[in-house]
Image: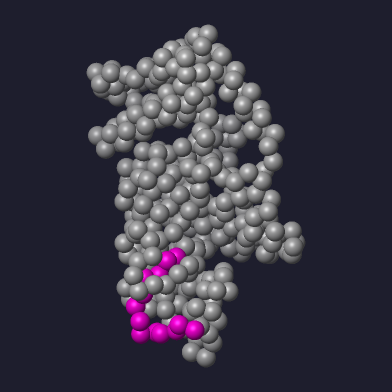
Amino acid sequence: MVSIPDLEKNLAKMQQLLNAAQNEVQKKTFQDIIDNLTKQLESEKSKINPTKAENLKVDKPSEKDTDKQSSQQSKTETKKQTESKPKSESQKVATSEVKEEEKLENKEEESLPPKQDYAFQGIGTLYGRIVRRYEDNDAYYNLISEGKTYELIYNSPKVKDFLRLDYNPDRDRYVTVYPYLTHFPNKNTPPKLGFTIIAANDTPHLDLKVNEFKLSGFWQFIAVCKCPVISIHRNRKGKGDRVSQLKKKFDNEKLNKKLTRANHVPVLWRDAPVKPFRFNPKLEKDKQGDRYFVEIKAKFLPGREQWGFMEILGEPTLDVPKYYKPEKISNSQVA
């Protein structure tokens, strides 16, 4: 459940972005997000104290006021619009209760799974032929799709057995995959792109068309890529999850790097409702900009090693699911 302070913070941020919107597409997107957050905020506040729900409702700005705010560009006016009003007694009570609830949540073990509403994800559908990378070796495979060849990676023994037993290089299939990218220190060098295979079927396995992907992660720039990316980290499901068990069992630095690596998927998203985060080494941590978690549908662009934005699947948020932070990597390449 998203907390009231998080919702209020996101709402204030979205209002600022609406005020600074530069075109109608951005204005509509921000307004839709604000409407959605407003409903969520009213709902959460009514749960805290139903008898005082009327006092806690969020005042939705009129259409006239919204248009007026959108046209104002000066920082002084924007600051005045976003200043918070003095809290009423009922709001103080609600805030106090929320703080007590947060204290209890902070004491819980990290074994709690990620929030149901948010999870890092990168999954999609490709169509093509699965062939052996080497004629006399059934341990390595490639995917030939739309005239391009991509290395296939598998993590499950069941997938390996399936590829070996059901091998037919002349047969086209719908292949369910995760993107697997390796970026290099020189950002002018294109990343190496492969895919982790999950399934191969005669009919689509997901509610996605060929080359369509669902991408959920941090919207940001990284030093080794010209294009902004969606960074997809490994979800942290708890102390007993697969990653935690393998790290504990083998205690191998190289394996740990592989287990906790993130996939940075380049995305062309011209009218994104929020700016991609860009780290500034000259600024202190608390002075850096916001890093949003986004959920979108994007189309894979064969031959370009990039994805193109199609639609938003969830409003950008500062609320992030638990994840494994990538462990230190070598200087030879960045993955």
Residue 170, quarter of the rendered image:
bottom left
Q: Where's residue 326, x and y in %? A: 62, 53
Question: In the current view of this chain or complex, which residue is farthest to the front?
Answer: 51
Q: Is residue 149 visible?
A: no
Q: Residue at x 56, y 31 (%)?
A: 287
Observer-nearest of 215 and 92? 92
Residue 101, quarter of the rendered image:
top right
Quadrant location, the C terminus: bottom right
Q: Is residue 220 positioned above or below 134 on the image?
A: above
Q: How is the image coloured?
A: one colour
Span colored in magenta: 165-177
Observer-nearest of 119 and 254? 119
Is 273 displayed left or right of 90 in the figure?
A: left
Q: Is residue 253 positioned above or below 14 on the image?
A: below
Look at the image and say whether residue 176 sits in the magenta stretch: yes
Q: Is residue 305 positioned above or below 323 on the image?
A: below
Q: Is residue 79 positioned above or below 2 on the image?
A: above
Q: Residue at x 62, y 62 (%)?
A: 258
Q: Where's residue 62, x and y in %? A: 28, 18
Q: Is residue 117 visible?
A: yes
Q: Where's residue 7, x and y in %? A: 47, 29
Look at the image and say whether residue 217 sits in the magenta stretch: no
Q: Residue at x 42, y 66 (%)?
A: 176
Is 97 displayed left or right of 73 in the figure?
A: right
Q: Where's residue 150, x and y in %? A: 43, 73
